[in-house]
Amino acid sequence: MMTIQQPDGGAGTHPGIARLALDVYLPHLDRFFDYSIPDRLAQQVQLGCRVRARIAGRMANGFVVGLPARAEVDKLSPLDRVISPEPVLLAQQVPLLRAVADHYAGTFADVMRLAVPPRHAATEAAEQNPWPAPDARDVPGGGLTEVDDGRRFLDAVGQSRPVRAHWCALPRWRSDESGLDDWTRGFVQAVGAAVGAGHGALVIVPDVDRVRRMRDVLRAVLGPGCVAELHSELGPAARYRNYLAVSRGQARVLVGTRGASYAPVHDLGVICLWDDGDDLLSEPRAPYPHARDVAALRATQESCALLFGSYARTAEMQAWVSTGWLVPLGLAPARTRRLAPPVRAAVDSDIDLQRDPMAAAARVPKEAFETIRTGLLSGPVLVQVPRAGYLVALSCQRCRTPVRCPTCGGPVGADRLGAGQRRLTCRWCGRSLNNWSCPVCGSRELRAPVVGSQRTAEELGRAFPSFRLVSSSAQKVVDQVGTTPALVVATPGAEPRPEAGYSAAVLLDAGLMLTRADLRAAEESYRRWLTVVSLVRSGDHGGTVSVVGPAEERTVQALVRLDPAGFAERELSDRQAAGFPPAVRMVAVEADEKTLADFRSVVEWPSDAQELGPVPIADSTPGSTEQLWRLMVRIDRTMGGELIVAARRALSIRSARKRPGAVRVRVDPIELF
């Protein structure tokens, strides 16, 4: 990593050299460049400011990352101009961006565009509104103070010690007038401990709704107007205004989504990240960094405290816990079961089958039906369904052949038109299939092996006609439900937040979630289910959860036991046996067949690396004619750095030789299927 050198001269002395990080994404040009500073720009150039310079015959924007006394080359080109003298890429950010780029086989420019928002000139020139200093005197109880070693962690944060922990928050409904529940209480306590010690704090959450919720509870505790926020739904002016408040040291507490991981919070005391298993924390743009790893790298570099929190525990978190890098915080499973709502599989004994012989085959067995009926007597009831839509998948009633589009081969589902009418539609190309008949047996009768949330809501609405029906999915998300009895049907992630907790919840089609073609299917299902449990009132207040699925499945059993730590241990053990991340380091290389062959011709993997593939990737993009291939390469974690260096070197060789074709390299991809 290139160091940042300060000028050797005294006050007012100008060194005449600027070291730049330019917006150049070519791997073989992934380095800093030295330029001479013309006299006309001498008073404007400073560390972190935006500049423009010529490279390889064209102009490129960039940032000043150093003012060295000596250049690395003899002949220097001059800077073209200073776009803005405002320092927005601070010195402490540069090592972090370089570390993230190296960790994910990317370039500094790739990470730089993720870290610094676009400039908004009018906002930069305007006078900033004052940011009140946070006051940590009214930090609430509960949260971390109720778990083993939680108080010791908070004391260490207050003493400015770089402690690191993962907290399994209690999955139960608990909220007061300020909107604080268990996990927000714990994060507010950690932020309050850092602020009380005179430090800044950074809170990272997966989505905008939780950003606003965390912002509001932090302002309620620390004082109005003292918390900045960064997320994609802010306008360009507001986003840049908040970023400037952080970079100038005016805002000491920041809450945001994954992009806030790089924000230059001054004198950082603690980083808090909620629910690292949420895929929204994984950046979809190159080099595809995960906010979890960015937070870990930053906490190490800046020697600050680090708190990960979630209801479930991912295999990545368990790997860090098992090595001692993270300290586990949480309640014992027995105590968790006493405080959280009870969870039971709908069909978990022979007695249940005797009472309801069709329970094993029914989609909503008698016990789940009774859970809904009883829950509606005292409040809203949540029914989670894995899929949105009406009839999500169809097959022939006679021979069970899946219905596919004759034009593109895509899956076909049914949409409800009203008045008992349905329309068959291809999910890829959108074509309507009128007069369909099975190409195998000729039958025109259909069956629906996968039923969506709309159909489920329709059926339950007929069963409980006296109650209000609420449907929430990605197409139309309902934010909140009140205290009056209502039947709420929602897909994972779209569950409305209850005003006073759900009286009951039913998890339908659990087996369907577990059989997804994804390495993380069990882990993701468990995380989704615990999120539902956290919305239900505790057993003392009449709450209950029923899961409809194979009771013998270990994921369902772990849910009944409310044992996220034990589940994570077994999940990590399976990854170690199978040789998948986080037990090993893995690189996924994707390109068309010819480009991938060219990449393999120049790459030199370490001798212990193992190649898996290449194999064609199922292409679900409508109208796409290009077939992509994927090569997986894995190695022991202790040699992961060598694997990434080999991939970076191969990308640089192809870039320098101007080889055609695009290559996508992902390190430890979250999707493996």
Image (tube, rainbow, N blue to C red):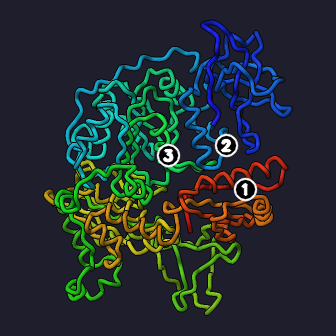
* N-terminal label among 1 and 3: 3
From the viewer's perspective, tell me whether residue 489 is left or right of residue 594: left
Quadrant in the picture for residue 314? bottom left
Foreground: 560 or 623?
560
Residue 45: quadrant of the picture: top right
Q: CA distance from mark 1 to mark 3?
A: 23 Å
Residue 107: numbered disc: 2
**Which residue is disc 3 drawn over?**
291
Question: Amino acid type of disc 1?
Answer: Val
- Is residue 30 placed above or below 387 in the rendered structure? above
Residue 244 spot, x, y in % from top left? 52, 24
Q: Select label 3 or label 2 by which is in front.
A: 2
Amino acid type, mark 3: Ala
- Whether residue 619 sits left or right of residue 584 in the image: it is right
Tell me the crowding category of disc 2: few under 14, some 14 to 19, or many 20 or more residues within 10 angstroms, Cα based. many
Categorize mark 1 by other alpha carbons within 10 Å: few (<14), some (14-19), many (20+).
some
Q: Is residue 330 above or below residue 22?
A: below
Kindly report which numbered mark, 2 or 1, lies closer to the viewer in this rendering: 2
Residue 75 image offset from top left, x and y in percent? 84, 23
Q: Which is nearer the eye, 218 or 449?
A: 218
Mark 2 touches mark 1? (CB < 8 Å) = no
From the image, tell me which residue sits under label 1. 663
Q: Is residue 185 visible?
A: no
Look at the image and tell me in which quarter the C terminus lies: bottom right
Farthest residue, direction top: 12
Q: Amino acid at mark 2?
A: Thr
